[in-house]
Image (cartoon, rainbow, N blue to C red):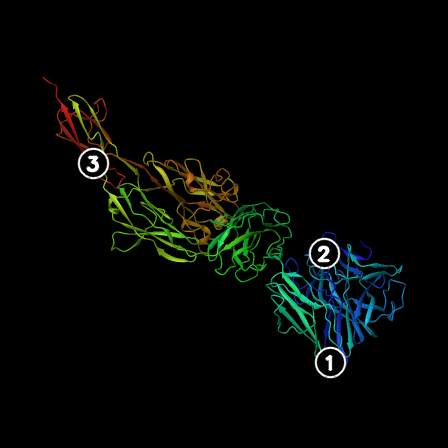
Amino acid sequence: MQPNFTLKQVEVLFLKPLLAFCLLILIGTTAVAQQYTNGPLSTGATTSNGTAAPAGFTWSEVQGANTIAGYGANITGNTVADDFTVPAGPSWGLTKISFFAYSTGYAGSTSPFDDVRVAIYNTNPSVGNPTPIFGDRTTNRFAASSSASMYRIFNATPGTTRQIFRVEANVNVTLAPGTYWIEWGVGTSQASNFSPPVTITGAAGATGANALQRTVTTGAWAALVDGTTPQAMPFIIDYATSGCSGTPAPGNTVSSSVSVCPGVNFSLSLQNATSGSGVTYQWQSSADGTTWVDISGATSPSLTRNQTASTFYRCRVTCSGNTGTSSSLLVAMAPTSSCYCTPTYSFGCGLGDAITNVSIPGTTLNNASACSTPPFTYYSSVAAPTLIAGGSYTVNVTMGADPSQHARVWFDWNRDGDFSDPGEAAGATTGSAGSNGTAVMAITVPADALIGTTRMRVRGGNDAAITATQSCGVSSSSFGEAEDYNVTIAPCIQGSFTTQPASSTITCGGNATFTVAASGSLPTYSWQFRTGPTAIWQALPNGGVVSGATTATLTLTNVPTTWSGYEIRAMFSGACTGINPSNSATLTVNPIQTVVSPASASICAGSIQRLTITNFASTSAPVTASFTSTDVPKPVPDNNTAGASSNITVSGLPAGAATVGIAVRFSVPNHTWPGDLVVVLRTPNGQILNLDNEITGTGFGPGQGMVNTVISSTGVNALSSAISATTTFTGVFRADRGTGTGAGPASLVPTTVNWSDLYGPSNGVYTLGLRDKYQLDAGTLTAWSIDITYVVPSYGEGVWTAAPAVAGTMFLDAAGTIPYNGTREDTIFVRPTENTTYSVFFNSTISPCTSAPALVRVNVGQPIT
């Protein structure tokens, strides 16, 4: 710790770089102007958390393991010193030395620095108080100063309060080969004056770094360290030399990073500079370290490069036909997981701006979460869902209670460690999802996405729409949260049928199923029928006797004999499979045969015989009945948790009727902000389902109200699919199925998200509840109705006749006291006076089947006289 002469920030850690030497040679005929730099300072145009520098500038970013941004080098308080080497060869004729400094908070466009003191030593100035071989500590050798086009920043903390300036000093001295030290200080009228150290991405300090700092008042020297790591100071020497000679010895190949992320620049340089004019350079690369190829245009002492695969590098340095080659260096690829940038928020998700659930329906991903600090979490332990290349999915993101909720999702399809490639901004909300709303974002996996596990990023809870380029750093809002997940991309497999449908034989009124199975990715099914071998194939949709028409199993219920002989087949397609038909199967529907127990009987005269039809028909075909409210209009109060409600009493449906489908039609035509409404339905069994949750959580508005809006158990499209400036949401939609206290009036909080939980006895009171959640747009429920689709069990019943027909011999009770009067019954009691044949045929008012008559002979034994 050196608080009297260092600028520190204890909250953040920084990384200091590896000391590097770079010789830039400009070829001339005699004396050649050249430059020596004692190490880099810029870390590039983008911060470690993805923030771009202002136009024309780059960042000099303190690295993560360090704490010091700059060291005091003000001529009134401190000087700094660092060494350099003139290599074997010609002497250097120094003409200028440039240093770097900043004044915290200075916002002027011109440099505030106007004084620079320089002394050059041929030994360490901290040992024995040596005399400079050039310069001193008192003479101002200022030549010029200008912006270095860099801002000094702490790690992941971009800002423009520390603009770095280049301060140039006039120098006139010739140095023979050897090691030298430069001591310097700069002056300004500003209160703050610091000099940044050499900075290279990814290193806390450099091997061999040994810069020093001197306190002016005491003359005491101390090592420049950050924590315990020695540091180096950047400076640039302008000098001239004579022509080169001998065979160059470039030494090691040096890289600013030993492992890099795909597409991220890194710097290559040489351990040793080669003096003199006429030196040429040719950088080479190799995939295996054996076969080398020249890199086009790479003919300077240093090279800026990026790569997508691990690569070896070296440089061939030539002087007068003599070539020396630097050592081979492998620059490896960093793990992709270490390359992703960090999304940031100033205020996070604590005020209702959190992501509370992320799911991809049809996969294993369904992760509930709470607001985290910081507001970014990589859920690496959550099992990666499998997505098929070429497949289509939705990414569903549920967010917190704040009324303005926007989301976006990215995928690293090519696994290069970023989300910036075309198509990687895969989906986004089209409007606000609303309080506790769910953003449903459609995405399609590119067919050429790399197979394997990659990263998905979700940002949500933002107060404004998120752009495609805002996967990193700050985004559209200071409030929100980000979450990362692993996803596995699997190859799309072409499919085919593995199980064909089998023919089926049933009795009229019975049920039949046809089942297929298929291989391949993301199979989808439909079914077709034709009435005979030469007839045209037709689509077989759900409805009537048909269910499961979009699944692998087709179910036919209560089938009539008219379907006998129909051929049935499945149609299969997949993510990379065209439509294919299965083999056909034949449906045979035999006529129903009435069965009476007993089939015949012999009784004594005066005895009573029971006759019962034993056939049982299945449930009826679905029947739909409509009912309309009579207690509307009902005002919907503005911004009121109690809301409004209206009842419909359903009665008159058959005893035992069971609900199998519901559709609710309602109109709120004068409500100018449809996204403020929530609508629920309560059925006679007490279950409550949310029908409209702020237009599928979008909070859409302003709008034209809602007119003849139908929310149906068979609806497919979300309300949000109809959003437009002129829409009245007229049509049939699926339920939003919102949950929680915000998804209904205070007394009608949803209890389920499943339509099936509402089904039960069909008769009873149905309640429609509405609530306006926000201000300035009251409305009125002007009409609503409900369609109840139900089924009723079908029993075997028929009309009984007798031959001969004798009055007073057929009854409804075993005692023979209630005469049978020709009604449809499953059981009668007979007391014939002579041998009689009874006839009955089976049918039902809700069955498609009628049988041929069954004949039951009852013989009567007469008493012996």
Outermost residue, bottom direction?
29
- Quadrant of the drawing holding the C terminus: top left
Sooner in the amino-acid sequence: mark 1 or mark 2? 2
Outermost residue, front direction?
290
Sooner in the amino-acid sequence: mark 3 or mark 1? 1
Could you tell me the amino acid type at mark 1? Gly
Disc 2 from disc 3: Cα separation: 93 Å
Q: Secondary structure at mark 2?
A: loop
Q: Nearer the viewer, residue 525 or 691?
A: 525
**Image check: 108 left or right of 346?**
right
State yes or no: discs 1 and 2 in contact (Cβ < 8 Å): no
Residue, disc 2: 14
Disc 1 from disc 2: Cα separation: 42 Å
Q: Secondary structure at mark 1?
A: loop
Quarter assignment of residue 508: top left
**Which of pointers 1 and 2 indicates the residue nearer the eye?**
1
Outermost residue, left direction?
865
> Which residue is at 66% across, 60% downward?
47
Disc 3 from disc 1: Cα separation: 117 Å
Q: Residues within 10 Å of mark 3 (few under 14, many from 20)?
A: many
Q: Position of residue 428 (x, y in %)?
A: 52, 55
Q: Nearer the viewer, residue 153 or 787?
A: 153
Residue, disc 1: 28
**Which of pointers 3 and 1 indicates the residue nearer the eye?**
1
516 in relation to 52, above or below: above
Residue, disc 3: 841
Q: Position of residue 787 (x, y in %)?
A: 36, 43
State yes or no: discs 2 and 3 in contact (Cβ < 8 Å): no
Could you tell me the amino acid type at mark 3? Phe
Q: Secondary structure at mark 3?
A: loop
